[in-house]
Image: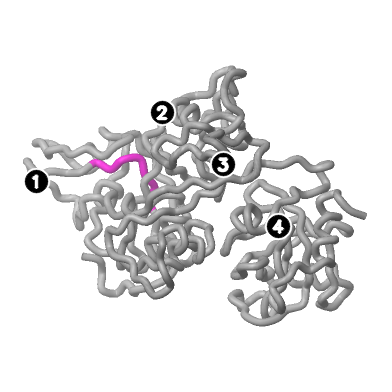
Amino acid sequence: MFKTSWKRMTISSLVALSLLPVASASAVTITVKPGDTLGKIAARYGVTVEQVKLVNHLQSDKLLVGQSLSIPPASLVYTVQADDVLWKIAARFQTTIPAIIEANKLNTTELLIGQKLLIPTASSNTPAPQDSSSLYTVVKGDMLWKIADRFQVSIQAIVDANGLKTTELLIGQKLVIPRKDADAPSSPADTGNMAEKPTTGKGAEPSASDKPWVTTANYTVVKGDTPWTISIAHGIPRDEFLRVNSLSESDYLQLGQIVKIPVHHIPVTSTPGASYGEYLDWFEAAQYLFPINAVATVTDFHTGKSFQVKRTIGAFHSDTEPLTAKDAAIIKEVWGGTYSWNVRPVLVEVNGRKLAASMTSMPHSIEYITDNDFEGHFDIHFPNSLRHKDNLIDPDHQAAIKIAAGLGK
């Protein structure tokens, strides 16, 4: 059991982790032999003593001959912080709640501050890149289908090149990206077990130049899940989650229930030049690239001044807040020393994509970030997004977006 002095908590917070190298790609069970110690066993299997103790819930280094021990798979150690919950930790590290539960042999989803968790990762034995390949480092928000789209190779090609046992990725993980074969399809056609191949028209698969398309992946409901928490964790609107699963707002989810998660594939589109952003429809593309809780860098199109923001809420457009007081000060400076409803073209850079957008700076209504010297949130609009007051398209915002996309004056 964990020390009773640790504080119980309910929701998520900041990351405090240390990467620990391991060599095993899957869990194994061993029997302690005469002369074995935790240090010898850890060294033998290329893990750490801490990892072995965590997965076996050991409180001391003492072992008994004949005792069974689990040797953890490739993983890192994460220290639980105030307000952490499993679903947010899983989302942060691009893994799943069941994977964390299994790796740690958890009997409950309740966490304690200071508790150590093993976070499963892909195998650390990544093949070295060959002449026909390049090496890519996974960043926040990456998924295999996004990387495959970006490099115009199939998901299966990446899986094969890296010997992956799972499609789940870890920030900082190195991936070998194989050279695109001339005869290969221009979009990732093989998604393994993640989803069925998308179709348009009479069974035709979309190419990278087509509009966004949607596939689905399965998710198993765990304790504490709600339609809202699941939708936020997967970067989709709650109403879409309900619709895809034929649920109403009054329906309850059951432990172990299998639900469908829409996976939105957003091909990269061309722009007139590097100083412009992609012109992407809010409802079919932009809202999935800039989901709730995502942090982005916004650059004012005319002055070139940049600041960081977070999308904290919003369905018809992005309700957004400055990340820090320094960011709020830059916004005020860009708008001439005072916040206002004046519309300005901006570029929103998030997870490697630069999007054409339009922004006002006037703080209003709900706020979630309370230490940024900004009382409320401001609005960022994208192509075909709607304003709150009447759910109509705002022509001033749309004109500014076209400027940011290089499509208007």
Q: Earlier in the sequence, mark 3 or mark 2?
A: 3
| Coloring scheme used | one colour
Q: Which residue is mark 2?
A: 163
**Front position among marks 1 and 2:** 2
* Cβ–Cβ under 8 Å for marks 4 and 2: no
Return the x and y of residue 398 as percentages of the image width and height: 80, 62
Q: Secondary structure at mark 4?
A: strand
Q: Nearer the viewer, residue 340 or 44?
A: 340
**Amino acid type, mark 3:** Lys
Q: Residue 369, labelled with which disc? A: none
Position of residue 195 in the picture relative to residue 398 (left or right): left
Residue at 22% in and 37% down: 28
Look at the image and tell me in which quarter the N terminus lies. Answer: bottom left
The alpha-carbon separation of the residues under discs 4 and 2 comes to 34 Å
Q: Would you place residue 356 above or below residue 208 in this image?
A: below
Residue at 74% in and 71% down: 328
Q: Residue 146, labelled with which disc? A: 3
Q: Which residue is mark 4?
A: 297
Q: Earlier in the sequence, mark 4 or mark 1?
A: 1
**Front position among marks 3 and 4:** 3
Residue at 18% in and 41% down: 37
Q: Nearer the viewer, residue 183 or 9?
A: 183
Magenta stretch, residue numbers: 71-77
Q: Would you place residue 105 above or below residue 330 in this image?
A: above
**Amino acid type, mark 1:** Leu
User: As drawn, which residue projects farthest toward the front?
Assistant: 202
**Amino acid type, mark 4:** Thr
